[in-house]
Image: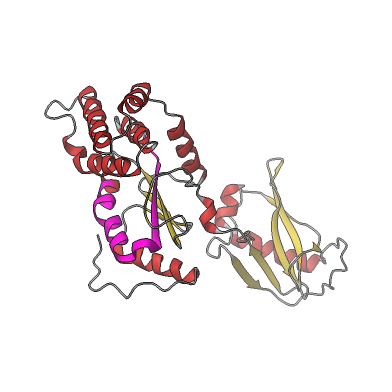
Amino acid sequence: MSHVRRSFFIAACVLLLVCAMPGRAKAATGNQKNLPPDLAWRVEVLFRSKATLPAGAEVHVGPRMPSKISGYDQVSITYTSSGTTSAPIPFLLSRDGKSLVQFNQFDISADPRTMVSESNRPARGGPESAPVSIVVFDDLECPFCARLNATLFPAVLDRYKNQVRIVYLDFPSPGHPWALRATVDVSCLATQSTNGYWNAVDTIHARAAELGGTERSLAKVNDSLDEIVRQSGAQQHVDATVLNACIQKQDTASVEHSREQGLGLQVQVTPTFFINGARIEGAVPIDFIFHMIDTALLAEGKTPPPAAPDAQGQ
């Protein structure tokens, strides 16, 4: 069934209008009303021409039913093959019988910024009331994440100042041997110091290729990660006893919660980030990011900074 849904009218995900010959159908009165045979046939022929059906599939066009769209009734199409009937596929049929329409209705009433929860996470840039929120699903062992951390996001903060707030959420890849350890360590520091957290994140991203020295064993890398976080904590005068106990415990509950949120948002790779709810995946040019932030600011009724001179893709 899913194959048919993808193949049928896939070029028009929101709306496809197909004109047919004038039919003799009368307007629906609010009750179900079977289509005249000639109109049902034209609908079936159109469906067969657009869908990829199993060999020998029988197509069934249901009756007209009321819809919420002015000038259109709803009809459902099913097909039967090898004794199995598909789930109904909904369409709209114009009252004059000339147009068949397929579309998806989505609820856009909620603020897109509420799609991603960033509560109790360290932030860079503006306050919680900043008009633009950038939420990043980050992996501390991800080279592309390190690139964005070192180049793109500093440029964003330099350009937009307090208009933008940046938050990292944890999404360590199971295929990265030390990413989970790094994430837990910096999360331990985050509970005591925002500055310490960001200093540790920056250091780990910058030094990822050299962690563990020449030996490069997982144990040595883990020792290096622990030491980076402890040093960053000491610089911020955090409670070393509490920090060391957290590092020793290696509790992954908060990390798993963050991963679950990412999976619920269909995050599959890092970096994936959301600008006021707009999803962006992978490494992208900085001028595109500026464009997206400018658009988000305008949507919030704010004026973007002047156009950045000679913006180059990063």
Magenta stretch in the rendered image? 146-173
Q: How is the image coloured?
A: secondary structure
Above or below 72: residue 147: above
Total residue callouts: 0
Identify the residue at image location x=81%, y=61%. Answer: 65
Residue 176 showing in the rendered view: no
* Apparent side of residue 26 relative to residue 143 in the rendered image (left or right): right
Q: Is residue 246 visible?
A: yes
Between 17 and 23, the one nearer to me in the picture: 17
Query: Which percent across, then down, holds residue 312?
Result: 23, 66
Magenta: main secondary structure? helix
Which residue is depicted at the point 51% across and 56% down? 113
Q: In the figure, 242 relative to 90: above or below?
A: above
Q: Position of residue 35 (x, y in %)?
A: 81, 65
Q: Quadrant of residue 254?
A: top left
Give the quarter of the figure containing the C terminus: bottom left
Residue 163 falls in image quadrant: bottom left
Left or right: residue 283 versus residue 220 is right
